Amino acid sequence: MAVRFVRLKLRLFAGGLRAGGWRVGLFVIGSLLGVFAAVLGYVLFSLPGLFGEQRTAELIAAAGGSLIVLGWVFLPLLYFGVDESLDPARFALLPLRRPVLLRGLFAAALVGIPPLATYAATLGLVHSATALGGVAAGVTELAGVTLGLGLCVALSRAMTSAFATGLRSRRSRDRATVVLACTAALLGPIQLGAASAAENADWRGIARVTGVLAWTPLGAPYSLGLDVAAGRAWAVPVKVLIVAGSIALLLWWWSATLERAMLGAAGSAGSRQRASTRTPVGQLVPRWLPRTRFGALAARETRYWWRETRRRTTLISFAVVGVFVPLLLLNDASEFGLGAMLVFIAALGAVSLANQFGFDRSAYAANVVAGVPGRVELASRVAGFSVYVLPALLVITVVMGVVGDWLAGVPAVFGTVVAAYGAGLAIVLPLSVRAAYALPDSTSPFAMNSGAGPAKALLSLAALVGAALATLPLQLVGWLLADVWRWVGLPIGIAYGIGALALGLRLAGPLLDRRMPELLATIS
């Protein structure tokens, strides 16, 4: 039965490629990136064995394997999403038992560029173990890296499924906000500890840490063959039990959350609300927005970004990165360096609109039928999203200025941040019209169709690089003018950002007017 799921996924993937155009190009680019990552990982993992360095090989296996497993957890949550070509909702009417469905989805998840690249990279450990301990060590390591791939996929799917369920309810969203705030408060002490450890690196201590990791599910599967090479064959069955037990628990967890996360089971009904005396328009459109078509669309976008699961996930991910990255570099960066980092954060906020129409899917047909002008459509979407992003960027800039003791430079830095946000929007808006891609009809906020992961990555990269280049002259002027820039940086930066956004709307608006039917067909 699992083979049928794999064949079905491959047929769906091949059907997507038959559409031609940018999908084939993105598949080729994604394949090349996967080959590069696989070759690089293979070389790094195999070198210690080729040079006969047993201890180095054990250290790299435990540390590198742990990083791979953690990468499979966090990258889908924060960036790439998960491939949901086989959405469980499509099997709801078929007489399939949950274990059969789970095995089929797990087997299908093992097929794709990321799993193949991960497996190929970790095969370098097989080469290293064979060089150090012979064929027996190599065969054992081959079994270990195979178990490691299964662990990565099971952990990734279990985490995304559970996180999707949690984000669906309002109460869980509020709890997530508190957890994120607590995490942000702990980043400072964690950073100081990491910096101190890096300055006073104790390789014996690092070896002890990796020795512990080798007995956890993170590093255990990648150290089996090296244990045989070191004469510790007794450790192999123990570690196999640790990894197999972890995979079984993760699959059980995934099974428990699968239906709620993918089929849209929501929590209990909300509490009753008082009847409002305001008019229907007054209830839907806030007082600060005009009672026009632009105001109605902006009000809708403001509400959707906070209530719709996928969009709310994007906002939370942006908040995590926006707080984490500057704090991580706070002690080691100057005001100019932190300003450049905040420019990156601002551009990252604009990237969230790179596939803004994909969130709507077939619901965008209502706007097409109504004949909403392209510039009004795009301007209202930017306004609704900016209600959350601009205050967040202001708070992050002020906090960085207070903690970094350059409070006087906050206005000029925030001006540069607004300029970067506007420049990022100017690049993202035409891309969102021309290079939109469909999202699966799934309630999971991390679900992606086959081939959409590279599309998301490339659109994000293009917007980030473009925004950085567009604001580079402004940053250089600020660095050269120094004290003068602190007085004029804010108005100039805001004017620059507004001008860039106006240019982006001028380019993307007519493009959207011409491509409304094609865009609807693409995202549907």
Image (cartoon, helix red, strand yellow):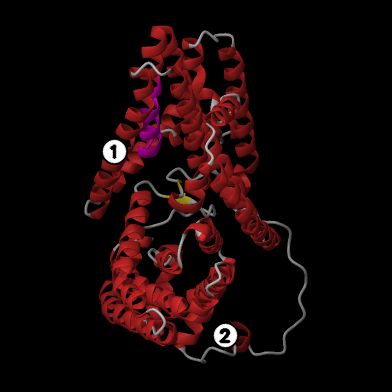
Q: Position of residue 411 (x, y in %)?
A: 48, 81
Taking the view exactly as shown, the residue that stands out farthest to the front is 200
Is 22 rendered above or below residue 403? above
Viewer-side residue, 121 vs 156: 121
- In this view of the protein, can residue 321 be seen by the observer? no
Is 121 colored magenta in this rendering?
yes
Q: Which residue is mark 2?
A: 285
Residue plotted at (30% across, 45% down): 30
Q: Amino acid at mark 1?
A: Phe
Q: Which residues are magenta?
A: 111-125
Q: Are marks 1 and 2 in contact (CB under 8 Å)?
A: no
What mark, if any, has residue 116 been given in the picture?
Answer: none
Secondary structure at badge 2 equals: loop
Magenta span main SS: helix
Q: Position of residue 426 (x, y in %)?
A: 32, 74
Secondary structure at badge 1 equals: helix
Q: Is residue 342 left or right of residue 116?
A: right
Viewer-side residue, 194 vs 132: 194
Q: Amino acid at mark 2?
A: Val
Residue plotted at (42% across, 45% down): 85
The crowd level at tag 1 (other Cα within 10 Å; few <14, some 14-19, many 20+) is some
